[in-house]
Amino acid sequence: MKTVMIISDATGETAERMVRAASLQFTGVPVNVRTYSRVRLETECEQLIEKAAELKALVVFTVVNAEERDLLAKLVERYNVESVDLIGALIGKLGSFLGAAPAGVPGLLHTISEDYFRRIEAVEFAVKNDDGAEPRNLPKADLVLVGISRTSKTPLSTYLAQRGLKVANVPLVLGIDPPEELAQVDERKVFGLIIQPDMLMHIRQARLKHLGMSNDAEYGKRQHINTEITYCREIFRKHPNWPVIDVTNRAIEETAADILRIYQERMSADRAAG
């Protein structure tokens, strides 16, 4: 079995993901990936390169400090070890292009990686918890959107998830109580969505037409819509701490901006109080 040794002055997680992803292209060839993180001493570097020489391993390193990178380059040459400098060439090229010197601070790449994977996790959470699919997950959400059908719950959830927030949404259905788990959510994280009846009727009738259904369906009738909105407002009145956002004629980005502003103000107030 071939060995790939990853040497990093940070966590090495990004490099490991890249190596494992690349190795998937070589089916039937087993690869032993070993990651050595936070390597910053000359003695550590030499010991690892010695080990790589013994194992006849490929060394992949992500080291942002120029001196440490040069040291590793000399060591792999001395011990005749095959190597890939995963970030050095990119940093050098960017430095020339931008006309600036790199900070050389370990861990910045990991910070970017963490943010990326947090957003991916948030989007997956939003998809799994769309339209009240998993009520048991409501207490785990950063934000919960509540409203009747066609009040932009799903697109808002997706948009906010791309900002790294775990968002769930709960449909309010006439005659059906909201899930019990909603009561377990911190009320400062719950947002109600409302829309004007005329706009909702227009949206729903367009939806019915798209689905090839009759405009006479209760779903698109004004009287039924008025009853739904009344029911929705009754629930909102029982929860005065839920901010209620009117989505009528508003772009998703506008509504999301309001929700984020209120959410951040509340979180900041919590931190100040704590």
Image: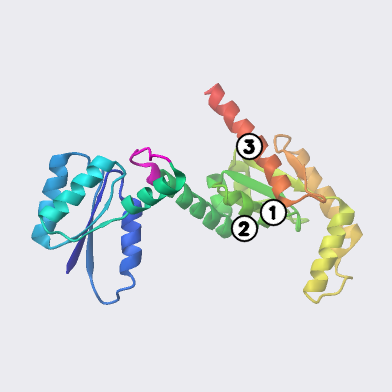
Contact, mark 2 vs mark 1 (Cβ under 8 Å): yes
Residue 9 painted magenta: no
What residue is disc 3 on? 263
Q: In the rendered image, which residue does mark 2 sit on? A: 130
What is the spatial separation of the Cα atoms under label 3 and label 1, in whole angstroms?
Answer: 16 Å
Q: On the rendered structure, is 38 left or right of 252?
A: left
Quadrant housing residue 41? top left
**Residue drawn at 77 percent across, 74 percent down:** 211
Q: Is residue 211 left or right of residue 104?
A: right
**Looking at numbered disc 1 in the image, what kind of residue is underneath it?**
Lys
Stretch of the chain drawn in magenta: 100-110
Rate crowding at label 3 as few (under 14), some (14 to 19) or many (20 or more) other CA atoms within 10 Å. Answer: some
Query: What is the x, y in percent for residue 176?
Result: 73, 55
**Mark 2 / mark 1, whichever is N-terminal:** 2
The colour scheme is rainbow
Secondary structure beneath disc 2?
helix
Graded by Cα atoms within 10 Å as few (under 14), some (14 to 19) or many (20 or more), the crowding at tag 2 reads many
Q: CA distance from mark 2 to mark 3?
A: 20 Å
The amino acid type of the residue labelled 2 equals: Asp
Q: Residue drawn at (30%, 68%), measured in percent from left and top?
A: 23
Residue drawn at 55 percent across, 48 percent down:
166
Answer whether labels 3 and 1 touch (C-beta < 8 Å).
no
- Say whether disc 2 or disc 3 marks the residue closer to the N-terminus: 2
- Of tags 2 and 3, which is closer to the observer? 3
Residue 219 makes an appearance in the image: no
Q: Amino acid at mark 3?
A: Tyr
Secondary structure type for disc 1: helix
Mark 3: which secondary structure?
helix
**Which of the labelled discs sits on residue 153, or is there none?**
1
Quadrant of the drawing holding the N terminus: bottom left
